[in-house]
């Protein structure tokens, strides 16, 4: 009788530990209690595209802290960049567009001479690839805003083969380079239908660097191209674009 009582008490004490433990594991850790909502929370893999074909796929996605331009590179990320560089070296006819993205909450934030975090992020990735032997002339930068702050795809890699019409008269790629000696500013430096130049902070940083550059390189020159939208006649917009370029030159 006494032995049975002892066994019964021991069983009760076991339940006191097992039940809360199972609740913690099943409900709190695995989130398998109560109503569950089916969701596809998988993070898209890091890939390099050539048109509709994925040349590289299945790699761990890059991650960026809020306001940061440097990714927290993992070994898998490093392996991806190694493979990108190896592919480009093996395929010299291919060029690469790196598109950096930024969160809605990062809208309007610039970094150095780059007017938004997307360009700055893409530029740093380009630097990683330059260190792996890829010429800067084979890489173009682009940027776009993400639709949500989770930034599940912070950087896109897209291969392309340059066409004859992609080159300007001086032999450079028309595709935006976003580098010091071939800089493009898409920020709203001009009001609609206006030639009054109102540079943003990113342009001011770049302009300060240009002064230093010309002090050290007196043989160099600068070409300024003013752009317009497609509203109005071609003749009017050509004149407006020229006046915008002259306004930037005066600045």
Image: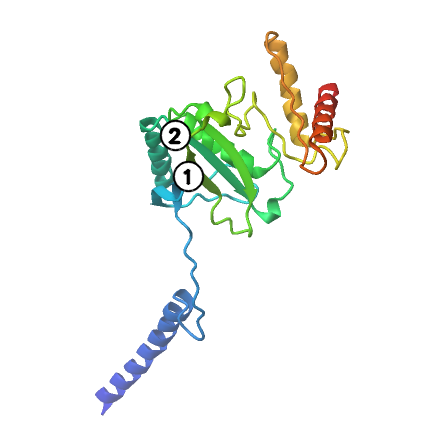
Residue 94's disc is 2
Q: Residues within 10 Å of mark 1 (few under 14, many from 20)?
A: some
Residue 21's disc is none
Cα–Cα span, label 2 and label 1: 25 Å
- For the rendered model, the colour scheme is rainbow
Asked if residue 215 is positioned above or below residue 187 in the image, the reply reads above
Upstream in the sequence, badge 2 or badge 1? 1
Which residue lies at the image location 36% right of the left edge and 43% below the top edge? 54
Residue 68 in sight: no
Residue 73's disc is 1
Which residue lies at the image location 37% right of the left edge and 35% below the top edge? 81
Locate residue 12 relative to residue 183 in the image: left or right.
left
Per the image, label 2 sits on a secondary structure element best described as loop
Residue 165 in sight: yes
Asked if residue 161 is positioned above or below residue 22 in the image, the reply reads above
In depth, the one of 248 and 15 nearer the eye is 248
Locate residue 36 relative to residue 119 in the image: left or right.
left
Q: Residues within 10 Å of mark 2 (few under 14, many from 20)?
A: some
Count of marks, rendered view: 2
Which residue lies at the image location 54% right of the left edge and 25% below the top edge? 179
Per the image, label 1 sits on a secondary structure element best described as loop
Q: Quadrant of residue 95?
A: top left
In depth, the one of 21 and 7 nearer the eye is 21
- State the quadrant of the C terminus: top right
Residue 8 position within the rendered picture, expressed as x and y whole percent measured from the top left? 28, 86
In depth, the one of 225 and 185 nearer the eye is 225
Asked if residue 52 is positioned above or below residue 36 in the image, the reply reads above
Locate residue 185 relative to residue 54 in the image: left or right.
right
């Amino acid at each position: 009788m006494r032995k049975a009582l002892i066994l019964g008490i021991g069983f009760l004490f076991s339940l006191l530990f097992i039940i809360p433990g199972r609740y913690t594991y099943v409900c709190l850790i695995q989130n398998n209690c109560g109503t569950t909502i089916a969701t596809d929370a998988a993070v898209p893999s890091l890939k390099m595209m050539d048109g509709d074909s994925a040349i590289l796929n299945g790699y761990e996605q890059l991650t960026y802290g809020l306001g940061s331009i440097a990714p927290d590179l993992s070994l898998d990320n490093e392996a991806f960049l190694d493979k990108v560089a190896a592919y480009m070296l093996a395929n010299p006819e291919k060029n690469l567009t790196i598109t950096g993205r930024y969160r809605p909450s990062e809208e309007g934030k610039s970094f150095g001479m780059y007017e938004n975090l997307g360009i700055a992020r893409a530029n740093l990735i380009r630097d990683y690839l330059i260190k792996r032997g890829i010429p800067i002339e084979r890489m173009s930068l682009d940027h776009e805003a993400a639709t949500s702050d989770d930034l599940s795809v912070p950087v896109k890699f897209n291969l392309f083969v340059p066409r004859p019409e992609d080159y300007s008269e001086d032999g450079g790629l028309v595709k935006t380079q976003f580098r010091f000696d071939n800089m493009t500013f898409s920020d709203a430096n001009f009001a609609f239908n206006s030639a009054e130049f109102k540079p943003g902070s990113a342009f001011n940083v770049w302009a300060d660097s240009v002064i230093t550059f010309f002090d050290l390189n007196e043989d160099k020159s600068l070409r300024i191209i003013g752009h317009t939208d497609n509203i109005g006649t071609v003749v009017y917009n050509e004149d407006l674009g020229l006046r915008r370029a002259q306004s930037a030159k005066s600045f």
